[in-house]
Image: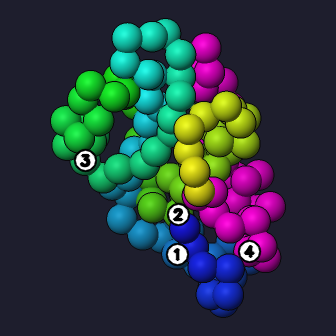
Amino acid sequence: MFAAGALARLGPDGLPVDFHNAPRNYTVYIGKAEGTNVDAYVGITNDLARRKREWKGVYELREVVTDLTKKEARAVEQVIMNRNPHFRNINNAIDRRHRWYRKAIEWAERAVKGRRLRR
């Protein structure tokens, strides 16, 4: 989670300058509780195969969005958490106190539009 007190330098779009300008090696995934047909968790990773091994026996993972920067992935993760309050996630992906929180959520809503995010 990004620290609320961290002062990010914002670009003209109101997002941190490194929101889009960083390595695009992150994937957002949704985990279906093993043995069920119920989506229960959302996360991000830079190695989906490794994460699938780590969650084996707990969640069956499916890719939602890929080729994102870490901050883009966190924003998408937050949108999915916001839409699915029953998910088992404990922490927010982005602190709501950030001055750029709303802009990040708006960007992520557009990024996931039309994707299958819940059952």
Q: Quadrant of residue 116?
A: top right
Closer to viewer: mark 1 or mark 3? 3
Q: Residues within 10 Å of mark 1 (few under 14, many from 20)?
A: some
The residue where tag 1 is placed is 18
Q: Which residues are magenta?
A: 92-119
Report the coloring of the rendering.
rainbow
The residue where tag 3 is placed is 47
Measured from the top left, where is residue 102 in percent x and y?
A: 80, 61
Magenta span includes 62: no
Q: Secondary structure at mark 2?
A: helix
Closer to viewer: mark 2 or mark 1? 2
Residue type, mark 3 in image? Asp
The residue where tag 4 is placed is 98
Query: Which is more N-terminal, label 4 or label 2?
Result: 2
Q: CA distance from mark 3 to mark 4?
A: 27 Å
Query: Which is more N-terminal, label 4 or label 3?
Result: 3
Q: Secondary structure at mark 4?
A: loop
Residue type, mark 4 in image? His
The residue where tag 2 is placed is 71
Query: Which is more N-terminal, label 2 or label 3?
Result: 3
Instruction: Determine whether 104 is above or below 119 in the image.
Output: below
